[in-house]
Image (cartoon, grey):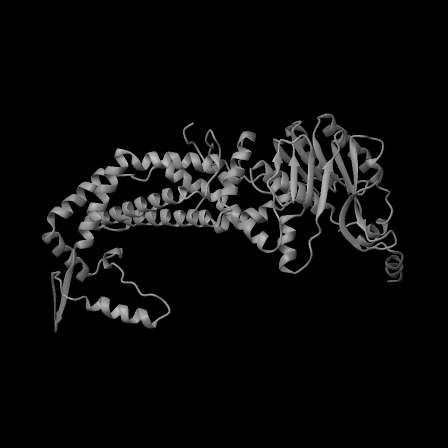
Amino acid sequence: MAFQSILGRNGFFRQDPSDLVMPRFFQDLNLDQILNDLFSRYKLYDLRQFYYVKPDIDDVEYRQQVLKDLENEELHKAMVDFSINMRKSREYLANINQSEIPEQKRKWKLDAAFYYINTVLELYRVLGEGYINSEGLLSFRDWLGDYLKGAVFEGFRKDTENLIYEFSSMSYNIQIKRDHIIVNQGSNDEDYCGNLLALFKKTQKESYYQKNPFWEITLSNLEAAVLDMLKKLHPQAFSRLKSFDEKYDGFINSVIIDFEQEIQFYLSFCDIKKEMEEMGFHFCYPKVGADRFELKDIYDLVLARKNASQRKPVILNDCHFDKHERFLVITGPNQGGKTTFARAIGGIIYLGMMGLAVPASSASIPVFDSVYTHFATEESMETGAGKLKEELIRLKKMMDSSTRNSFIIINEIFTSATSYDAYIMGKRVLDFFMDKDCIGLYVTHIYELTKNDSRIGSLVATLLSEESQIRTFRIERREASGKGYANTIVEKYHMTYEEIKERIRR
């Protein structure tokens, strides 16, 4: 099969930038914080086109293989260097538009071509060093080998290297005599400037290098005079430079351009993964398409980064769905880790669907076509609708858009309703999604929702003991009782006996 893309065996469809919209669940799961950080670091590339578009299920393992290859430090460094050098080549080409001197424009193109040629040759060399095992990179290496051995590239390479040699062989002398500057053709005289720089190099920590004066965008009068002299002394070389400019327009291969863009998807995620691993956190490659939903030692990326910076511990949790279960209802005290747990699972499903490693020690998840989330928000003063109405409108959109293969996360809704109404509406919402055969999580204080339905499993955010108000941040499978956290709700709304007495006294 011919090489198509390192993001998918049969290619990767790129949406128009104007059509790229961050999915709603990114904000609910705090994924926007992670991704906006990456977008900022890689602002020279539009990473939205890769992180906003889910691949086909057949391409999940294909991507995992590429990411595993890039765990090799030598290969990872080679890909970073490749990206830097490709940007340098394009920078030379961009300089063409800033110059008004034809010879300088042509020389910029020649230098860009030389940089490009050496960049792709070095990339091919590294890919042949035995670092790669993935189908995607092996397929690209085969394509690159054929491209480099082709007659078109070979002729382009020879023309470029010959011209570079001609221009690098040109030399000249500058003599300064009082109020005169004399420019002559170069000779074999000793290079005093080079010798002087070599002396400084031995005594300074930083190395010195001599910059080509013609690389400046605007030439000084002296540099313009030197250029005129070189044109007269080497007319054939400048004639060949003009022919080169006319012959090789748009020499960077489109497949190379796409590869450079797409490899940033992996390199950017490697940044996050490496940073987390250096802080002591683990990742694994999930089994996507498994019959069983089971996660071990999971954590939330955003909270883990925050806690690590503050030297706070991160509690790991497990999660699984029994075969007959469609929803897990999570109850427990406020600030006990319920929402963080839900976010961690949602993030794992998203990363797994994208063909990336996930924050867990092991993970097996079924195939999901999308993630739908509904997290409680503040009442909007702009819409004029009450909080309950806004929640119902959002729920309607989820119900209409979701499929039997969607993963649903509902977090702390109907809090503005009475407990009985919240129970009735919550039961109807759960029944709707379960009847649709969706799988999901429902975070709530209404523990009665865990009763009398074999399709619902009960998880509880635990306290150190029933008498204690100390949170363990452990989410455990157990029957929800409603005990042990009623006081926390009272405390949240400042309705303790002492607080009510104080308000009456005032």
Q: Residue at x 27, y 68 (%)?
A: 198
Quadrant of the image containing the C terminus: bottom right
Q: Is residue 44 visible?
A: no
Quadrant of the image containing the N terminus: top left
Residue 306 is drawn in which quadrant? bottom right
Residue 263 is drawn in which quadrant? top left
User: 496 or 469: which is nearer to us?
Assistant: 469
Q: Is residue 325 left or right of residue 482?
A: left
Q: Is residue 250 left or right of residue 373?
A: left
The picture places residue 421, in percent across and down from the top left corner, at: 82, 36
- Residue at the farthest front position: 130
The picture places residue 357, in percent across and down from the top left corner, at: 58, 42
Q: Is residue 28 above or below residue 304?
A: above
User: 494 or 105: which is nearer to us?
Assistant: 105
User: 471 or 8: which is nearer to us?
Assistant: 8
The picture places residue 107, in percent across and down from the top left corner, at: 23, 49
The picture places residue 367, in percent across and down from the top left corner, at: 62, 31
How many numbered markers are drawn? 0
Q: Is residue 122 visible?
A: yes
Q: Is residue 115 above or below residue 183?
A: above
Q: Residue at x 74, y 46 (%)?
A: 338
